[in-house]
Image (spheres, grey):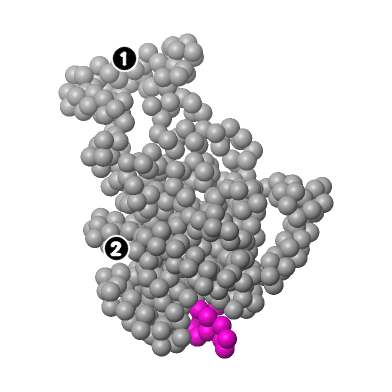
Amino acid sequence: MMSSHAKAAAQFIKNTERTAWHDQALFFVRQKRDNVAKNIDEWEVLRTKASQIKEHTVSNLEHYLTTFEKNAKANGIQVHWASDADEHNKIVAEIIENHKAKKLVKSKSMLTEECELNHFLEENGTEVVETDLGERIMQFLKLPPSHIVLPAIHVKRQEVAEIFNKEIHTDANNSDPAYLTQAARMHLREKFIEADISMTGVNFAVAEEGAFVVCTNEGNADMGTSFANVHIASMGIEKLVPNYESLGIFTRLLARSATGQPITTYTAHYKKPAKGKEIHIILVDNNRTEILKDKDHSNMLKCIRCGACMNTCPVYRRTGGYSYSYFIPGPLGINLSMLKEPKKHSGNVSACSLCYSCSNVCPAKIDLAEQIYKWRQDLDKYGEADPMKKMVVKGMKKVMGSPGLFYAAIKSGRLINHMPRFMVYNGLNDWGKGREMPVIALKTFNEMWKKGEVRSNESSKNK
């Protein structure tokens, strides 16, 4: 029996050309990350410091949250608290209603994806426009992002040309990126001007200053907040850092880890609303305090949402974002989905080769792969362990525990070398789907050793 991820992945990899292209595009970003990291002698020191700062901040979360609230209010920012997604969405709707607003422009925010905000607002009569180019493409396609930083990475430019032709009446035969980008810019410029309210996420919030930072490469957050008189910022409570000195460490790590840039093109700091304008920030829990209590998985609160773990993951790169049951894919999504609803998302934990590359590239040194391994050990506890795998493991335990059975199994295994292909490669052989079975050696190492056909290095030297 295949896991839910494996079944969904089978659909993605049917298109071998797209699979190869997706794999190469993301690994190119991974290589860019490696190149810029190599040019910073203190790269590993920065990662260690980032991990330590996050550990300290989330361990003293109440202190830093109350400090941030106090200082933000002193700066004129209106602070709201939301215990879950529903409360977050209601607060946003209430702000919109109080201002009799109808049009809202949004920059990229995975927290609003988590809260399913767009759907909620649209059902209540608010026009919501995603202003990040990749997010706008996905909004036109009526699909969620497939990557947290590169939301439309799986969409080819020819497909973008088709959807732009349908939605904003561009030339369907012109897929030149410069042409499509310019068309999107003109289309979105009208939306910025018409908007009543602008909404952003929050990359980092600085407790001592009561300020927050939004990082983009397109300047869409800055454009939206410049035109609209009301700015709503949604922030997960784990996004806090103590001070500007700490912030400097994370801004050096974020873009380099995410896209291989020294820094994002725009790093906007919001501290006080301009005259005649309002800033609202919503501090959202939505299960984060529960994660904090989990000693095995609380490290997930260190995440700065750079996407480096996805860019390096061999499974995600070859199976795409929609193979996962959670709105965040890859190693990050596997862990977050299990923290959210383990029974619902347990099929994702098989989407890991345990190569540990995700743990090795994480700028905050989160033990992503180690946590996935722990989740696998807990599958039986949740009643989600594969019964076929359990049976195989029991059989293996019995065989491996008996030398006689072990060597008998090896001898019988050699029969595979002489079987007709149809008997080896069939529906019962999952390994053989897309792979060739290894040839079973005619002699075991143990047999060769006993007959003196192999020698240790020391024996060879002495001879």
383 to the left or right of 174: left
Q: Amino acid at mark 1?
A: Ser
Identify residue for label 2. Answer: 289
Q: Nearer the viewer, residue 164 or 332?
A: 164
Q: Is residue 265 visible?
A: no
Using the image, determine if residue 115 lies above or below residue 7.
below
Secondary element type, mark 1: helix
Pointer 1: residues within 10 angstroms few (<14), some, or many (20+)? few
Using the image, determine if residue 94 lies above or below residue 135.
below
175 to the left or right of 317: right
State the CA–CA distance, disc 2 to disc 1.
54 Å
Q: Amino acid at mark 2?
A: Thr
Residue shown at 37% from the left, 80% from the top: 68
Magenta highlight range: 266-279
Identify residue for label 1. Answer: 412
Image location of residue 392, percent across then percent down: 28, 25
Q: Nearer the viewer, mark 2 or mark 1?
A: 2
363 to the left or right of 61: right
Q: Nearer the viewer, residue 376 or 456?
A: 376
Q: Nearer the viewer, residue 92 or 222?
A: 92
Q: Is residue 155 visible?
A: yes
Q: Nearer the viewer, residue 36 or 304?
A: 304
Q: Which mark is on residue 389?
A: none
Q: Quadrant of residue 199?
A: bottom right
Residue shown at 59% from the left, 79% from the top: 229
* Residue 415 shown in magenta: no
